Image (spheres, helix red, strand yellow):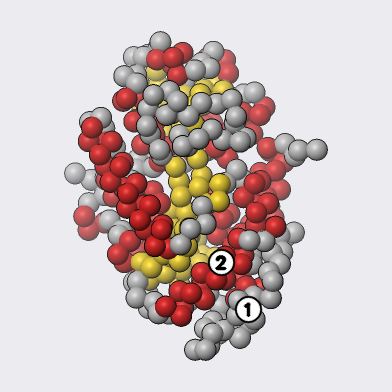
Amino acid sequence: MKTSAPARRSVAAAAVVAGLGLSLSACGGVTDGTGDSDGFPEESITLTVGQDAGGSTDLIARAVANGAQDAFGVAMPVENQPGANGAIATQQVANQDPNGYDLVLLNASLITITSLIASEDEQVSLDELDVVMGLSRDDYVMVAHADTGYETLDDIAADSGNLSYGTAGVGTGSQLAQLLMFGEADIDGNEVPFDGGGPALTAVMGGQVDVATVQVAEAMPQIEAGTVNPIVVFSDERLEFLPDTPTAAEEGHEIPVAQYRAVALPAGASDEIRTTLEDGFREIVATEEYQQFNEDNYLTPVEISGDEVEEQWNELAETYRQLVEDNDIDLGGAE
């Protein structure tokens, strides 16, 4: 019997955050606890997260960290340093020695979207990091409270000018996807930015805003409960857990906005350290336990190499920049 979304989400969160019931078994460990020829790793590896504990990024970090003992032979404590969409934590890690003991769980939006609004001295560049590998994709969905009667994008367009819509905040994928969709579809409304997708969804449920774009994992419990209606998803293809919800592309709008995540370390690491780290993380993500974690949290695996991550994210950054310019979108932020 398929577990309901609320149960799946709460069980997964409790298991990851508390470290209970999620023992990732690896096939011997890439280091067998002894490290490579230079002894790496000989001590614990710190994984820094630039977001609060309990959110999607934090849960992903703890899921991979729980497999470190088996894969690397050492512990991997997770440290949360929230602020500036992860820029503070990422910059701090980028300034460390590239010895493999300081890693960051990196959000693509920091590179692809925040760079569109941050001042030059506040921007974080992939040139400052060596990306180990990609992990997963978190998709976005536009939702409306069921009582509004909105079931399609045309329903929303019919009320253009009389709408309010919530986003997860300035410089987020939620904001970018929502503004681009309304811009391309010529829908007028009043933006209400919140501090995260959870508050934006709560505002929809409470009637403070008519619609909002949030991450799928945030919306699924309310979608399955019938509280909100999914209007459109921003993935390239329809999602298996929302098979009846059209993509933005199907509605005639090429808006490929998603949240990707990857593991990175300071630039300049040796090939041996990068290889050891990548092999270890690949061992972790191959386990049944980690794959179940992805499924429980509606995450799509995107387990590509560091070079492929950098190429993909740089392309996305340019795509987003062009879309913002073409649609004359104002994301706010620094002038």
Residue 111 spot, x, y in % from top left: 34, 53
Q: Secondary structure at mark 2?
A: helix
Residue in view at x 45 percent, y 66 percent: 132
Residue at 42%, 78% (x, y): give it. 271
The amino acid at mark 1 is Gly
The quadrant in which residue 234 appears is top left
**Residue receiving disc 1:** 73
Which label sits in the foreground, 1 or 2?
2
SS for dot 1: loop
- Provide the residue designation for mark 2: 281
Report whether 301 appears left or right of 331: right
Asked if one can make out residue 69 in the rendered structure from this viewpoint, the answer is no
The relative height of residue 224 versus residue 9 in the rendered view (above or below) is: above
Q: Earlier in the sequence, mark 1 or mark 2?
A: 1
Question: Farthest bottom residue?
Answer: 38
Quadrant position of the N terminus in the picture = top right
Total label count? Answer: 2
Which residue does the image show at 42% across and 29% down from the upper left? 249
Real-space Cα distance between discs 1 and 2?
Answer: 12 Å
